[in-house]
Image (cartoon, rainbow, N blue to C red):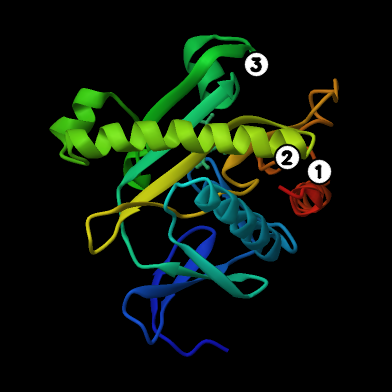
Amino acid sequence: MNCHPQIYEGKAKILYATDDPDILLAYFKDDATAFNAQKRGTIVGKGEINCQIAAHLFREIEAKGIATHFIDCPSAHEMRVKSVRILPIEVVVRNIAAGSLCQQTGISLGTILPQPLVEFYYKDDALGDPLLTRDRLLLMELATPEQLESLHSKALQVNTILQEFFQLCGITLVDFKIEFGVDNHNQILLADEISPDSCRLWLTGEPDPNLRVLDKDRFRRDLGNIEDAYQQVLARVLGVRT
Ligand code: C5P
């Protein structure tokens, strides 16, 4: 039982203080939300699964030279992380067209993009997380030009690392969302989580457009077998030796 003060509750995680002011404890919940929390539900076992997947991917990314907030997992659904000031920017990287890219541009689902597309969204529920331009982002002073450059380049590096890793798992990385934070030394760290909640993951080689989905689109689109899909991602992620 954690008796430290709760400092934040998000849609998928609760953050608790610890005895060390530079370290927080993230508790991963089974709660699932979609469409800016208009759709709510529970995915049994999701907290543990996502915590384990995120831990593994953070280790992988850290080993390849990108600093993250990850420290360790004291239990299956808890992660110790470095305390950071989260930048209110959702960074999305896309390799294959899906979701809002298809809805907003008319590009067909499944189109392989000629190069990874990096997008920035304003992390603001009240505004519905709008897509930002670079100039809007700077106008709103959400980041400095140097920070923006760093986010862009780190996002592409994370994409390369994750793409290569998921390929070994027999999974195609369609797109994902990541968040970054700034620590006390002004260093930018990859933060939040990387999991089937925040990535689109398709089973490589599966031609059926519904069967191939191993991510939160199963919940968003009521495709069923959500727990099995998340469990399959975990099993494949843990099965890879790099
Ligand atoms: O909905 P959209 O196509 O813009 O989502 C792109 C990627 O970012 C998807 O992998 C989705 O799961 C993720 N995402 C997220 N949290 C949001 C918005 C998008 O994890 N608030």
Q: Quadrant of residue 107?
A: top right
Residue 111 in which image quadrant? top right
Residue 206 - label? none
Residue identified by numbered label 3: 109
Q: Is residue 121 visible?
A: no
Question: In the image, is the residue at mark 2 within 8 Å of ligand 1 by its beta carbon?
Answer: no
Taking 40 as reference, is 9 left or right?
left
Decide if ligand 1 comes within 8 Å of the CB at mark 1: no
What amino acid does circle 3 point to?
Answer: Leu
Does residue 104 lie above or below 134 as drawn?
Answer: above
Give the image location of residue 234, x and y in percent: 75, 53
Q: Where residue 163 sits: x, y (%)?
A: 63, 32
> Which disc is residue 224 wearing?
1
Q: Residues within 10 Å of mark 3 (few under 14, many from 20)?
A: some
Secondary element at tag 2: helix
Q: Residue at x 85, y 25 (%)?
A: 206
Question: How busy is the neighbourhood of tag 1: few (under 14 within 10 Å), some, or many (20 plus)?
Answer: some
Q: Quadrant of the N terminus?
A: bottom right
- Quote the CA–CA distance across marks 1 and 2: 6 Å
User: In this rendering, does residue 173 appear at all?
Assistant: yes
Query: Which of 206/100 is in front?
Result: 206
CB-based contact (under 8 Å), mark 1 and mark 2:
yes
> What label sits on residue 218 in the rendered view?
2
Is residue 223 shown above or below 77?
Answer: above
Looking at the image, tell me whether mark 1 or mark 2 is earlier in sequence order. Answer: 2
Q: Is residue 96 above or below residue 53?
A: above
